[in-house]
Image (tube, helix red, strand yellow):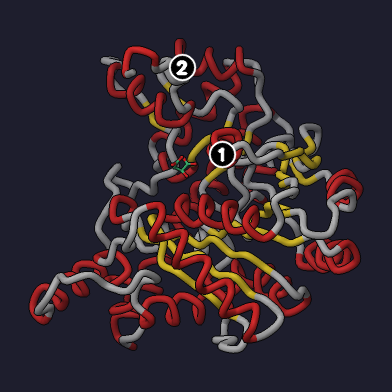
Amino acid sequence: MLSNLKPQAPDKILMLIEEFKADTRQGKIDLGVGVYKNPEGVTPVMRAVKAAEQRIWETQVTKAYTGLAGEADYRNAMAQMVLGELPVERLASVASVGGTGAIRQALELARMGNPGLTVHVSDPTWPNHLSIMKFIGLPFVEYRYFDNATRGVDFEGMKADIAKAKAGDLVLLHGCCHNPTGANLTMDQWAEVAAILEKSGAIPLIDLAYQGFGDGLEQDAAATRLLASRLPEVLIAASCSKNFGIYRERTGILMALGTGTADRDLSQGAMAFLNRQNFSFPPDHGARIVSTILTDDALRADWAAELEEVRNTMLGLRAQLAQELRDLSGSDRFDFIAGHRGMFSRLGATPEQVARLKTDAAIYMVGDSRLNIAGLNADTVPVLARAIIDAGI
Ligand code: LMR
């Protein structure tokens, strides 16, 4: 049996980690996987996370199973953070194995409710979205999203394409900080998206993996809240990997908003069932860290302050890189970098140019020219800017 297995194509993002490790050149720069690094190149454990872990260690008396849906404290605190309220009549939620686990469960849930559905995804989107859908045999089509000429959103194209989604189809949207492009919709544009979905009955699946990394915790949730208030059915897959810096704890949540208590109860049952089929009980440690922080005023304030530091560090790097490139190129054609939000920006370079950055300058980014802004620091920004110009981008 095992000898019948086929070699799997490596994940493009994860492959870069290995390539980078194997590179022996001094001064190599890793702008690949989406992990925040501070100016010293470290992905730190946040202060509030350490404090919460200490508190858990001191007070936890059992590690017996949690509920199939995870702990209510965690799910309620997360719903408050994402939705700004707790719509108890409409909301079903389960803790998941990271944001990726929530995406996977959301897709399976949608197919249980509508076996004939098609998923509409942005072109481009996070490659693992596509990979999961291919693996579970869920049909998908792409909607236009990134305009390579402006490095912004092709909003007319996007609107025309998502209008083709039928009632009961899913439209996968990045709630903020679009991965991989960094190009995002304005709130007016989100309102237009809501109107299109309202008309067609297609259902948004919102991937919210970077709340707090773009314009702030509240601002980054605004689009999700708008869709939640306007549409009868909304699925939300949120991750705590980035904003709590607990990547390896695999902490996420799937939320389903329906029209009332009957939908809510059916969704809750189906989502708990999916947990049971896939992994049984969700991991608890990361969820407990998050609920400890979010339900304690002092810890929450400290966490939010550190998250702001992280966000502002990235904004500073964006401004510095745009300025360096303005100086070197004598043009404003890289100003989009300062306007993008989140961890990533897509440069709009060709695969050959991206390969040149790697071979000539030991700078690693994903082949579609997505760079992780958080992989930079004040010293490496000028190096990257020079290399971008030298690669003819
Ligand atoms: C990324 O896009 O780099 C992150 O979401 C990490 C991952 O798992 O790909």
Q: Vertical placement of 328 versus 123: above or below? A: above
Q: From mark 2 to mark 1, how far is it between C-alphas?
A: 34 Å
Q: Quadrant of the C terminus?
A: top right
Residue 69, by quadrant, is bottom left
Mark 2 nearby-residue class (10 Å; few <14, some 14–19, many ≥20): some
- Mark 2 and ligand 1: say if the CB distance to the nearest ligand atom is below 8 Å: no
Residue type at mark 2: give it: Lys
Asked whether 283 or 311 is in front, the reply is 283
> Which residue is located at x 36 percent, y 28 percent?
17
* Location of residue 24 in the rendering, given as x and y in whole percent from the top left corner: 26, 15
Asked whether 13 or 271 is in front, the reply is 271
Please, what secondary structure does the residue beneath circle 2 have?
helix
* Location of residue 272 in the rendering, given as x and y in whole percent from the top left corner: 44, 67
* Location of residue 102 in the rendering, given as x and y in whole percent from the top left corner: 49, 57
Q: Quadrant of the N terminus?
A: top left
* Relative side of 393 to 192, left or right: left
* Relative side of 37 to 328, left or right: left
Residue 249, by quadrant, is bottom left
* Relative side of 344 to 195, left or right: left
Q: Vertical placement of 329 versus 381: above or below? A: above
* Location of residue 32 in the rendering, given as x and y in whole percent from the top left corner: 44, 33
Residue 358 is labelled as 2
Residue type at mark 1: give it: Ile
> Which residue is located at x 57 percent, y 16 percent?
390
Mark 1 nearby-residue class (10 Å; few <14, some 14–19, many ≥20): few
Residue 350, by quadrant, is top right
Residue 136 is labelled as 1
